[in-house]
Amino acid sequence: MSGCCESCSLAKDHARADCGTKPSERTRLTVALAGNPNSGKTTVFNALTGLRQKVGNYPGVTVEKKVGLLRLPEGTWANVIDLPGTYSLVSRAPDERVARDVLRGLRADTPAPDVVVAVVDASNLQRNLYLVSQLIEMRAPLVIALNMMDVAERRGSRIDPEVLSRSLGVPVVPVVAHRRLGIHDLVHAIGRARPAELPDWQLPAVMRAEIAGLARALDPAQRNGAPLASFPARAEGEPPERRQERYRAMAERLLVGDGVEDLGLLHSPAAVATLVDSACATLRTAGVDPVQADIEAHYRWIEGISAAHESAHAVANEPAHAAANELARQAGPHERIHAPAHGSVHAPVRRRVHARPRSWSGSPVGERAPLPSVPLTERIDAILIHRVWGLLFFALIMGAMFASMFWLAKPLQEGLTAIIEGAGAAVSGLVPGEALQSLVRDGLFAGVGSVVVFIPQIAILFLFLALLEDSGYLARAAFLMDRLLAKVGLHGKSFIPLLSGFACAIPGIMATRTIEHRKGRLATILVLPFMTCSARLPVYGLLIGTFFASLGALRQAGIMLALYLLGILFAAGAAFFLRRTMLRGMDSGFLLELPTYKVPQLSVVGRQVLGNSSKFLTRAGTTILAICIVLWVISYFPRLPESRAAAQPDANAAAAAQREYSVAGRLGQAIEPGIRPLGFDWKIGVGVIGAFAAREVFVSTMAIVYGTGGDEETVNLATAMLADRHPDGSRIWTPLVAASLLLWFVLAMQCMSTVMVVRQETGGWRWPLFMLGYMNALAYVVCLLFYQIGSRL
Amino acid sequence: MLPGGANVVSKPTTERPEPLPSVRLSELPVGTRAVVERIEGTGDLFRRLLEMGFCNRARVTVVRRAPLGDPVEYSIRGYSVSLRKDEARCVMVVAPARYE
């Protein structure tokens, strides 16, 4: 074992010899940043590491791993790990699992931290201290960064870091991370980190008895028969109290449902589980739930610490709704729960806005805080979550975001495409041979182009998302929309990703990472492609314009709208179905914190945008490029024999003949029997195959196959399509066929780029392949029924 | 200065008197204050609610309802959290007057 392991006070009983760090890194201090979501942890991380950051993934889970370098006062470097923001370390959410595993040194890919910096939101102390209490229980060497001191001050909270430090027994550094105040002191405090003294949690007597009993059963020295548990690599001659303490800790962990892998080995997990179950049963008959008792004990300790900070303004300064406070006081000493406060639902908040909030000015200790002022956040919320104004504002923001993705992105996309096409033409001129030229221009560069074309929309969406999330508004948006989405089993946070799907599914799918609940997130991803993306529009335009022209412009727009609604309907239905079957379960519910509003930080926002764009490029981009090349190959080869090419009347006809002769063409002809019941012929088949690169490619593929050239002019194409006949003389293209094809494009999962991004976001092939399967199967069945029934009417 | 339970001394579960008649948090109108008595239910939601501070007779205020009716924003221990109706149903509360 290296020196790092021996001095690692978190690594109590490592059986592992290799934590995966490089030898040069092993001598480096490892600092982990832990804290609640919205506590400003990321800002602290940025302040500590600056640009020296790297974002990746924890292997095996879709949890982001952020590490950076910090220069310590002594001149050496430390690794800083930004753990996922968590409310607790025991719950089953993947983020919390990973945070806990890293802290306990259970992850082979991450060394156990030597120091843990707990970022605590000073304006929200009690709940934040819950995580701290768990860190204390872990005996982690702690430094507390008491962040958002300015917000706390504004709310009239007076927390004395000195007093807190004395209560906890660890260094407490006041910090205002977004103004970089206190960071210097924080870095210096890292060297003084130490494990806090373990408080006496005051569990109920019956629980302590059960823990003691279970510990005795686990301790080989105290039981007869085969040992149930042991601690490997224990020093000989360990005092009995220490050994008993060890087993006691193990027993307590088991009773509250936490893992014990870092503590020791369970030789017979089944036998241990039986013992634990019977202990829990005993407790429950005594009216004690072990999980509840444990959490309550932690909060009692927290309340004790709060009481130590209590000032004369304790009651008056209840931050939320000093207004509601006022009202309650006026209601009299015998409050009846069922009496409504006053007529209108929003009256209390609106009527009582008096004093302005004080600014963060570092007023001297001991000065009286002004009478309860409604904090700025609540005042903003009174408008932004208002029944009328709130929804209006929300519609405005969503409209702006959506419009940007559609109209702002367009010129950027066209510009990028033009540049790449130009580059492709130039480079292809340099290579010898027609095949190679085509490969470079139509395969490579066109492929790169089809990857890069997503970047403007991704960047714009993530710019909006980062601004919304950092400012705190995203939680409000989820709050507003949750009712609608809950009806189909989704989460309020699914709204923005789904909305983005109207522009393009790819940024929408990437945006689902704001959804913490795994099943809800998956369900959102799996139904997102149903939202009518902008790539379908050229196809809709072609088909509606050609085959429904007689209906007039208004009805055509109506059909377009109907297709949009159909997409939404199927998305809702699919989500509903998935959440009742494969992805059933509440996770840990909606439960959403509404953080204080803050001005978004450009550095954080910028990092998000750049990070997500580059992630897309590296993860999905390479595979999309590969697929484009494959598609090029099957369209280009085998080459039409010279004689046949020369026999064609013009270049367009030659291109059409080439396409028919190619693998893609043959594939189209091969699948024709399968797709004829849907009303499609082999040319449509080739078009659909081409659409797997991108849906809009369908139009250009059709143009090639029909010999009308590969450009955007669809007039000739329309004529050609209408003129096309079966061997028996009947029209290939009827309105019914067109309708069936429209239905196909509404439902089918075609865009391989989307599939690649789903793979990137879900971390495996299972879900993208499932999505491919279920959506295309659905499309096939629906189109089949539609065409068959339709042709008999 | 630190709200939510600061004035109340709570005792370990077994030493508490029998539970008082309580109502569900979801039934409270906007603007009322109440005290958390216990959480019903099991599993992840149960643990999560407790961890978020819905325990030890914490004071909870019903702040506002979303425009579409659900979820509802509550204030507890100095921060705001929104819960859906079927989550708030699991929180049993009593009138603060009982403990003051």
Image (cartoon, coloured by chain):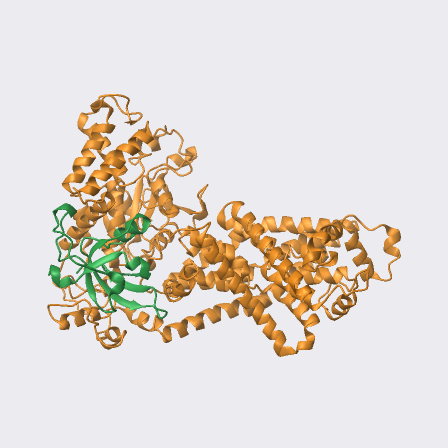
Chain colours: A orange, B green
- Residue A658 image offset from top left, x and y in percent: 80, 54
Judge from the rendering whether residue B51 lies leftward or rightward of residue A692; answer left or right: left
Judging depth in this view, the residue of A727 and A194 nearest the camera is A727
Judging depth in this view, the residue of A528 and A424 nearest the camera is A528
Residue A618 in view in this figure: no
Judging depth in this view, the residue of B10 and A63 nearest the camera is B10
Q: Image quadrant of residue A81?
A: top left
Residue drawn at 19 percent across, 42 percent down: A285
Q: Image quadrant of residue A694?
A: bottom right
On-image quarter of the N terminus of chain A: top left
On-image quarter of the C terminus of chain A: bottom right
- Residue B9 image offset from top left, x and y in percent: 12, 53
Residue drawn at 16 percent across, 53 percent down: B19
Residue drawn at 34 percent across, 65 percent down: B70
Numbered circles on residues, count: 0
Residue A221 in view in this figure: yes
Judge from the rendering whether residue A390 lies leftward or rightward of residue A439; answer left or right: left
- Where is A630 relative to A550, above or below? above
- Residue A103 image offset from top left, x and y in percent: 33, 41
Judge from the rendering whether residue A583 lies leftward or rightward of residue A231; answer left or right: right
Judge from the rendering whether residue A566 lies leftward or rightward of residue A608; answer left or right: right
- Where is A138 relative to A563, above or below? above
Direction front: furthest residue:
A793
- Residue A64 image offset from top left, x and y in percent: 43, 48
